Image (spheres, rainbow, N blue to C red):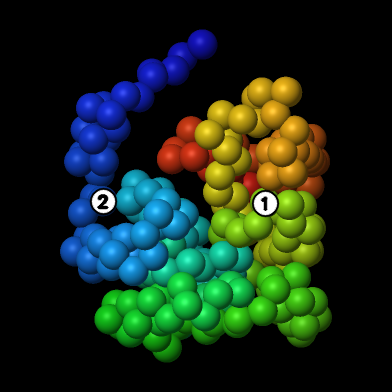
Amino acid sequence: MKHTPVDDALYGYLVEHGHNGDPLLAQLARVTRERIGDMAIMQIAPEQGTLMEILVRVSNAKSAIEIGTFTGYSAICIARGLTDDGTLLCCDTSREWTSIATEYFEKAGLGAKISLEIAPAIDTLAALAADRTFDFAFIDADKVSYESYYESILARLTGNGLIVFDNVLWGGSVADDSNRSDDTVALRRLNDRVAHDDRVQAVMLSVSDGLTIVRKK
C-alpha cells in the first residue's frame, strides 16, 4: 500500500507548501473560533478550500450548490472559482452561523454571486425549478441525509459535473464495523453506494476528514 502517514509536523509542512494562506479566509477562521467556540471544528481545512477552488476553476463551473454553509469559508472558496457570471446557492438552517458567512461574502466581494436559503436543504432542493441544474456541489451537512442529498443533486447535475462530500472518513470510524452510531452508519452507507454507482466516477481522498469527489458520467 502506497500511503504516507501524516503527523502534526508533516501536516504543517503540507499546508505551508500549498497556497493556503489567504488573509481573508484566515481572518474568517479566527472570527469563527472567537464567536462559535468549539463548534469551529466544523469549518473546512485550508487545503480543502484550496482544492475545491481549483476543482471549480478547472471544471469551468458556472452554477454551484452548497449543502451546509456554516460561517462561509467553503462558500467563498467555491464562489471564487466560478466563472465571472457564475452563481452559488447556499443551503443552511442556522441564521446565527450564516450571519458570519454573509458578512464575509461581502468582504470577499462575492455578495452578488451567492444566494442563501435558510431552510432544510431537502425542502430547498424540492422547491427548485425542474430545469435548475448545477455544475458543482459541495455536501457538508447532517450525515444521515447524505444519501438523500446525493440523489437529489445528482439528478440536477450536468454531465461531467462534480459533487464533493466532506467527512467521509468520519475520524476513521467508517472502517470500524463496531461503530454503529447513526452518523457513521449513514456515511458508511453513502460510501458504499457511491463506490458501486455506475452513473458516476468517484475517488475518496484522505484530505482533512476525508473527501469523496464524484463525477457524473
Residue at figure coordinates x 42%, y 88% from the top left: 112
Which quadrant holds residue 35? Answer: bottom left
Amino acid type of disc 1? Answer: Lys
Of residues 203 and 22, the one nearer the viewer is 22
What residue sits right under mark 1 in the picture? 143
Say which amino acid is labelled 2: Asn
- In the rendered image, the residue lying farthest to the bottom is 112
Q: Position of residue 89 (x, y in %)?
A: 57, 77
Label 1 Cα neighbours within 10 Å, binned few <14 / some 14-19 / many ≥20? many
Is residue 63 in view? no
Q: Nearer the viewer, mark 2 or mark 1?
A: 1
Q: Farthest residue in the front direction? A: 37
Q: CA distance from mark 2 to mark 1?
A: 27 Å
Q: Quadrant of residue 18?
A: top left
Counting from the top left corner in percent of width and height, residue 179 is at 70, 29
Tell how many labels: 2
3 in relation to 209, above or below? above
Asked which secondary structure carries label 1, the reply is: helix
Rate crowding at label 2 as few (under 14), some (14 to 19) or many (20 or more) other CA atoms within 10 Å: some
Q: Residue at x 72, y 38 (%)?
A: 181
The residue furthest top is 1
Could you tell me which residue is drawn at 71 percent across and 78 percent down?
124
Q: Label for residue 20?
A: 2
